[in-house]
Each structure stands twice: as structure tokens, then as C-alpha cells.
Amino acid sequence: MTQPQREALIDLLHLALLADSHVSLKEDTSLANAIDAIGWDSPRPREIHMLNSISKARRAAESEEAGAEFIRTRAALFETTESQTEAISALQNLLNSDGISAEESAFIDRLTKSFA
């Protein structure tokens, strides 16, 4: 996974958490594990990206249009089937950690369609 893909995946993970307006302790733990698993390869600290990412995800969650644009721009960075599968897998693992809601399932569907 490239560094831009890592950053995009972190952004998508944060937005996914907001999909059902409920963040459980299981999701919080799963998020930390997912972020550790994807690694980081940038001189800029991961924590700075994460703080910015959370803020951007919150703004994107405020409207359907903003959310769609957020997903579309991040999805564009996953150009191969392998990278797309890796991203979807990370998101599904996060969202399945406390049971996937209808809103979370819709989020995965929108992302999958953005890859097409």
C-alpha cells in the first residue's frame, strides 16, 4: 500500500465510523488495530494526519454531497483490484467489530461503487 493510499484509508476509516452516528468501544479498538496494521511511511507524524482526518470526516458526514465527494476522491487512489480489496477488507473488519448497521453497509456499498 502506498502512503497516499494509507492516508486515504485512514480518512475512510474515520468516515465509516460516523456512518451510523455511533462509535462503540469495539470499533475504537478495531480502528486502532487497523491503523497500526496499515503502517505509516511519511516524515509527517501519523497523529497529525489522524487529527486532520477526523476533522475532514466530520465535515464530510454533514451532508450526502460532501460525503460522496470525500469517498470519491479517496477511492480514486486505490487503482488496483488488490488495493481496493485491501481497503474494503479493512473497513469491513472495522464495521463488523460491533455488528454492521444498515448505514454502515450503505457506506461500504457507496465505496465499492466508487471503485468501479
Image (spheres, rainbow, N blue to C red):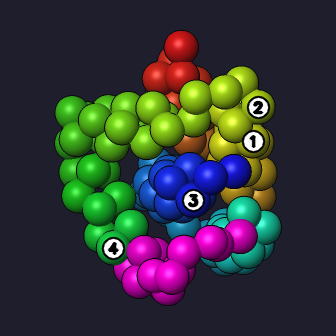
Residue 62 picture location, percent across and down: 22, 51
Numbered circle sitting on residue 52? 4
In three-dimensional space, the C-alpha distance between marks 4 and 3, rounded to whole angstroms, equals 16 Å
Helix or strand or loop: what does disc 3 sit on? helix
Q: Name the kind of residue labelled 2 in the image.
A: Glu
Which of labels 2 and 4 is toward the front?
2
For residue 3, the mark is 3
Image: magenta residue range: 39-51
User: Rounded to the nearest whole Å, what is the CA distance between mark 1 and mark 4?
Assistant: 23 Å
Compare marks 3 and 2 and give the one earlier in the sequence.
3
Marks 1 and 4, the one that precedes in the sequence: 4
Tell me the residue that label 1 is attached to. Answer: 86
Query: Disc 1 versus disc 3: distance between alpha carbons?
Result: 14 Å
7 sits to left or right of 73:
right
State which mark lies toward you, 1 or 2.
2
Residue 46, magenta (yes or no):
yes
Question: In the rendered structure, are the residues bearing label 1 and label 2 in contact, judged by CB atoms less than 8 Å apart?
Answer: yes
* Tag 3: amino acid: Gln
The mark closer to the camera, 3 or 2, is 3
Kindly identify the amino acid type of the residue bearing the numbered disc 1.
Glu
**Membership of 96 in magenta stretch:** no
Few, some or many residues within 10 Å of mark 1 (<14, 14–19, 20+) = some
Q: What residue is drawn where x is 42% and y is 75%?
A: 49
Query: Spatial distance from mark 2 to mark 4, Cα to Cα?
Result: 27 Å
* Kind of residue sitting beneath label 4: Asn
**Pick the front one: 101 or 90:** 90
Residue holding disc 2: 82
